[in-house]
Structure formats: C-alpha cells, structure tokens
Image (spheres, coloured by chain):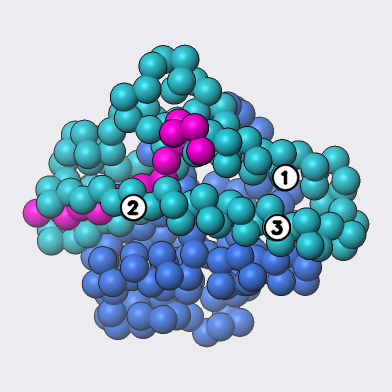
Chain colours: A cyan, B blue
Amino acid sequence: MLRAAHRVLEPGGAVCFLVIAPADDLTEAETAEAVAAGPPFVASDLPYQDLMAAAGFERIEVHDVTEDYLRTLGAWIREWEAERSELVGVVSRTEFAERQQNRETAVRAISSGLLRRYLVSGERT
Amino acid sequence: MEEHADVTARHEAHYRLVEQRVLRRVEARVTGCDYGATSYTTRAQADRVGRMLDLSPGKLFLDVGSGAGWPGIYLAATTGARVVLTDIPLEGLRVARRRLEHDRVGGDVVAASGSALPFPDHTFAAVTSSDVLC
C-alpha cells in the first residue's frame, strides 16, 4: 500500500495514516501473540520508519498513539455494554460476545506491551 | 489472523447494518462521529490528520480502505478538499456514496485494493488511511 501511495502522490504530497502493529523488539512468539490479539489488519512486524523509507518517503515521523487506542477500546467496550439489549437484536448475541471478547483481548495485549498504534506521516519529494 | 476473503465478507456483513440507529449512537459516543465505523480513530485524531496533510479547498486526497467514509468524508467536509474513497467491500462504498450525496461533500468512491491503486502517477496531493494492511 505504501509503494502504491507514493506512486499516486504528487511531488511534495504527504501521506498520513494510523496503524495498529506489534511493538518493536518482540520475540517471534510475542509478535505472533500480538498479531493474533489485534484486529485482522495487523500484519507487519517491521518498524514503520523502515517501511516508509523503503517505499520512498522522506521526512518520516512516527507518533505513538497507543494510549488513545487503549482509551478508545475501553470506550467501545463500555458503550457496547451500555446498549447490550438493543445491540444483540442487531448483531446477534454470538457476534456481540465475540466483538467484546476481541476488544478485551486487544486491551490485554496493549497492557502487556505487545500491541501499539502509531500515527505515521511522510512526504514524497 | 483471518484470511483477506473472510475479513472482506465480515466487513460486507457489518456495512449492511451500519445505518442502524443504535450503531450510529454508540459510534458517536466513542469516536465523536457517526459514519458507520467501528474505528479506533477519534474525531481529535482525524482533525490532527487533516492538519498534518494540510488539506484545503482545491486539493484532492485519497482515503485508502475508507470503509463507509470515516474519516475521509469527515475530512473533506471539514477542510473543503475533495476526497476519493477506495476499499474492497462494496457495501461500505455504497454507504459512503450515500453519505457523500446526503452531506453534499465533494468526492467519489472507487472499488480498489490499497496495493493496486487504479490511478495515474501524481494524482493526489495527499493520501491517508486508518488501520488497513500496509
């Protein structure tokens, strides 16, 4: 995606995206645990600084927004619980339980230092 | 990790429900907006992305993996830039198109994978995405 984004950008154009990824410097087993605990789009175990540079971007910045991610996950869990009776009529009891369980798993992975969320930006010169 | 086809099928099923009031209500309380997303991107973060991309009227930007339009449509609405939204689940793009028309926001939707963008070189002033595969 980053190489494709670089190609379609005008010279001087900017890319800025949010991404959930395993923390840096994990063992292979910890990385596998982080990927399993995160949303289905968690795939890369390479630092985004390196991925961005390999795609041709310059002036790369990587901001850690994991605390915001944790707060937002907590808000999803609380607000879904608050609307449980209506939500199970929309998404089914099974899916309600599954989504809440996935969120709790991600919270545990973040709290264990396995999973992080980053705001990444760069420029095409 | 789920296979891509499974994820797409699950997203299609989700987008068929996103205009349900209870989902919009919960989303608004969690993220501050109501675009049919189950995103971790808050309104404050979307505003930060808009500033970092220097979006403004006359600029064209791309939202890769846009889903139902959060935060791409919001950024277009708040900055005046035009947006092209791309994603694979068609149901999400249908919701996004209805929202573009309803809100009278300048933009379009294109079904495409983020790794094979069907646009000429140097088309966009900015590119953004929120929690998609890289």
Q: Which mark is residue B3?
A: none
- Name the chain under label 3: A
Residue mark closest to the camera, 1 vs 2: 1
Q: Is residue A70 left or right of residue B120?
A: right
Give the spatial CA distance, label 1 vs label 2. Answer: 25 Å
Residue drawn at (35%, 80%) of the image:
B79
Give the spatial CA distance, label 2 vs label 3. Answer: 25 Å
Q: Which residue is mark 3?
A: A78
Q: Are marks 3 and 1 on the same chain?
A: yes
- Residue type at numbered disc 2: Leu
Q: Which residue is mark 2?
A: A119
Residue A97 in the image: x percent, y percent? Answer: 80, 42
Q: Is residue A41 visible?
A: no
Magenta segment boundaries in residue numbering: A111-125
Quadrant including the N terminus of chain B = top right
Instruction: Tell me the quarter of the picture where residue B51 sits.
Output: bottom left
- Residue type at numbered disc 1: Gln
Residue drawn at (66%, 33%) of the image:
B6
Q: Which residue is mark 1?
A: A100
Dominant SS in magenta: strand
Q: Residues within 10 Å of mark 3 (few under 14, many from 20)?
A: some
Q: Under tag 2, what secondary structure? A: strand
Which of disc 1 and disc 3 is earlier in sequence? 3
Q: Is residue A65 left or right of residue B14?
A: left
Residue A8 in the image: x percent, y percent? Answer: 26, 53
Q: Are marks 2 and 3 in contact (CB under 8 Å)?
A: no
* Residue A117 highlighted magenta (yes or no): yes
